[in-house]
Image: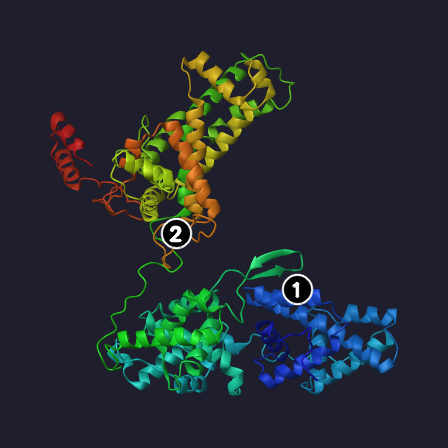
Amino acid sequence: MTTPTFLDEDAHRAELKLLARFLLHRLATKSERDALWRAGGLAEGQVAQTDLESELASITASTEEGDREQACESVAALVARGMLRTRVQKQTGTSLQEEQRKWISNNISAHSSTVHRARAIWMSEAGLADEHQRKIYDHALASAIAGTTGENQPGREPETTPNHSEKEDPVMLDPTNLREAILTRFKFNLAGLPASLRNIENQKIFLDAVIQSVALLGHEPVPDGEPDDNLEAMVWSSATAGLLLLDGHYDPRDGRFFQKVQKAVAELSGSAVETNSVEIDGHGVNMFAPDKANTQKIAVFFKTETALREKGGRRDKLFLQSLASTSRKMIDRYDDHGGDVEHMGSLAAAAYDTHVSVASGGGSNEGVANVELPPLHDPNGYNDEIEPDNIRAVSTIYVSHQLEFMIKACMRIVDLFTAGLLPIAASESNVRAIDDLAWNRDDFLDESARRSVQARVLGAPGGQIAFDQQPNAEFNMLLMRVVSAVAEFEREQNIITHFDNAARGVRFQVTSGEFVRKAIRDFAANASLRGWAGTAFTAERLSDHIKAVMKVLNLPAVKTAFGVTTPWQVVERVSQREFGITVNTVLHRTLAVETQNIMRIIADNHTVWSGSPLGKPLFSIGQDGEGDLSMQATHELMVASQHFRAVTGLGDAQLSEFSEPEAATAVPSLPDIGGMGGGMGGSVPGVNMDAVAQLQQMANSGTTDPDQVMALLRTMN
């Protein structure tokens, strides 16, 4: 009997292995798994395919051991009910009666009191049951036929290894067989390895540590299993070992070794392409997930080895480091070969030979040390200098700065309302929002506090900050460079503009997208540095304040009281009457909206500003554009920059000046801790401890010359 289609082992290999482990209370051999899947075929036609797919997906979607156990219980019970229904029909020769169907539904479930029956049904139908499980199955079958629970019900099965000690206790795993299997297929390239890994005994210790670590992460070998049973575990362990050696992590005694193994396994669990999607719980909602058989990186690793041996003629042992390097290159070039071993052959062979030659100093595996550097950029694009949440917080503070005139006008309206000086009846719709804002104003920052934050974070004038802090004087200049670089890049995409520049005798130099990337990186690093710690909570309060203000300004009663039709006209009217000024609402609103859009795009795409590991251009231009930034984000960034330029009157001369690239400067990724003596990265000067010592000496001696004290205070920072 073949494996039933509705229990497709190729499509659900990981889920079915975990289910078999649950049923057996231990790891299953391949023959045991095959017997279980054949037994499960009895449920075909009794279980809805969508229900089964949903339940199976929940097994691997569970991240905690307890959740995974519950998911396995649910799948086991679902299929066991179908198996028992089929068996009852075969025994009676008739279709199920209502009382039989009801008994099966109520007594074969994932509940802790009945799940032992589901396990007994599986094991008995697969021919793997012990005597006690067989008794449980026979009693369940007789009860189902009768439609009522029979007498002399057997007790629950004894708990053998409920905690799966093989996985939880790494000492219990003997890696010898798997390690020897790995060493029959692979070897270490001694070039570049430390002396400790140049002898076979230490290489075995290294591999044993990798195997045990990988086993703890869910890819353990089957004890005493056949070679086919442990092929998957061998691929995971050998791939992980190769990546560790390639990246220079050699010492299992290093306290961070297991963490490095986790990182390697996480890399191999990822996808070479992000085009596959799976449905969640049958609700029509799709999420991205790698295709385990094709696009998952561990699958590409296995196919790379296969291509080297079958198509590349590499029949001998392969170097672990070179295979890992080649596999990474095959992952990067997945679009070129599509996972087809035929197409991978020549590509993999060339990449493998190149790495061996470079790593071995010209061909000998006893040659010079491997001088191939690891990637200097995070492969995922992450950068210590850029924190997206910090940028979003600073963006909110910038909006509050541009809308300061609106907040000030609204709070004046609140004061007039509280004093009874506005022709607004308390019975009018929603006017309680004004009273709420009046009584909740202590929850918001007052004007002095707002200007202090804006001075520190944005370098805005008019705010008082502490003596050990410095205003962010570079913020506005860096923002102008971003806008100018984007606007100049867009302008130079137009061929008419190119000819126009040449006709006017202007030296023409196309602005590279990398100039824009550099300008945005500098601006993002600056904003990120100012967004740490309490800045996020301050931004949250400012956001709540702006929302409350907009709610008040949009009240029909308020607009009627001032004889206007829009909230911005309310602001203009109040500013003219109460403060004697005319506010340029168009300028401030545009700067607030477009700068927020620019910073949102920067935060949402924070992984692309430090460079492209794949060498892609920054922008997606034209119908076939394949840049780091999507077509939509590219369009939005360019539109926002042009709107910014329009309201600020940024002319050609300034545009050319600000769009010129500048040398990269040191930008700290963390804020300086004031008062610790000396600035970190030069961002904030520390306290002059010599001046502090002199002041202490003056205080102790009783001499307090006012002029000398003032002179020392001026040199404090």
Closer to the camera in the image, 416 or 225:
225
**Residue 215 in sight here:** no
Q: Which residue is mark 1?
A: 54
Q: Quadrant of residue 432?
A: top right
Q: Residues within 10 Å of mark 1 (few under 14, many from 20)?
A: some
Mark 1 vs mark 2, foreground winner is 2
630 with respect to 54 (left or right): left
In the displayed structure image, the side of residue 308 where residue 122 appears, left or right: right
Percent position (x, y) of residue 305?
A: 43, 78
Residue 612 sits above or below residue 347 on the image: above
Which kind of residue does numbered mark 2 sit on?
Val
Precedes in sequence: disc 1 or disc 2: 1
Residues marked 1 and 2 touching at CB (< 8 Å): no
Residue 681 is tagged as none
In the image, residue 114 lies at what x, y percent?
A: 72, 72
Residue occupying image coordinates x 74% and y 81%: 136
Quadrant for the N terminus, please.
Answer: bottom right
Q: Quadrant of residue 318?
A: bottom left
Snapshot quadrant of residue 83: bottom right
Query: Label 2 belongs to which residue?
Result: 608
